[in-house]
Image (spheres, rainbow, N blue to C red):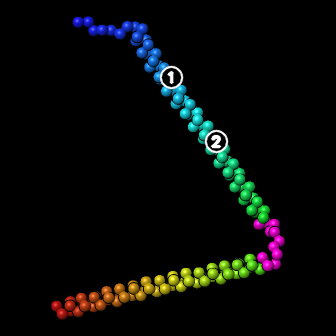
Amino acid sequence: MDIPTIPDQLFILIILIIIAFVVIIVAAQWKSVAKSKASIVLLEKEIELKKMSMVEKDIESKRLMDNPIPLPQEQQDSLSAIRQSTTQVRSEVGYLHSEINERLARLEAQTEQKKLEKMLKEIEVKEAKLKKQ
């Protein structure tokens, strides 16, 4: 029984088809890598532009802060009232925060004192039992 063999031309044809598929796959991968690199470069440029825009806005806001626009007296009074009320609220918040901290410290101290008193009573009871023995 003879094993059928593939003719040389058919073998070469199969190898050429395989090579063609490999070349197509490599080309597709190469193209996707090139697209990725281009999109990365584009994103880097966008980030750079955003940074420049932020710096420009910051410079503009600093310039406006350094050269305040003269406001009418009514608006200046309004701003002054807002600043005053903000200051009052901040001071009250600070006071309340301090009061809470003080009360919390007092509560902790009282709790600790009660715990120690209880331990002292327990020790006195144990000492009394030892003296009886």
x, y percent for residue 43:
62, 44
State which region is magenta.
65-75
x, y percent for residue 47:
65, 48
108 falls in the magenta region: no
User: To which residue does mark 2 refer?
Assistant: 42
Provide the secondary structure element on which disc 2 rests: helix
Side of 2 relative to 107 (left or right): left
Instruction: Give whichever of 61, 77 is nearer the camera.
Output: 77
Instruction: Tell me which residue sits at (69%, 55%) in the image.
Output: 54
User: To which residue does mark 1 refer?
Assistant: 23
Cα separation, mark 1 vs mark 2, equals: 28 Å
Q: Amino acid at mark 1?
A: Val
- Label 1 CA crowd tier, 10 Å (few <14, some 14–19, many 20+): few
In the rendered image, the quadrant that contains the C terminus is: bottom left
In the rendered image, the quadrant that contains the N terminus is: top left
Q: Earlier in the sequence, mark 1 or mark 2?
A: 1
Instruction: Tell me which residue sits at (47%, 23%) in the image.
Output: 22
Image: 49 above or below 32: below
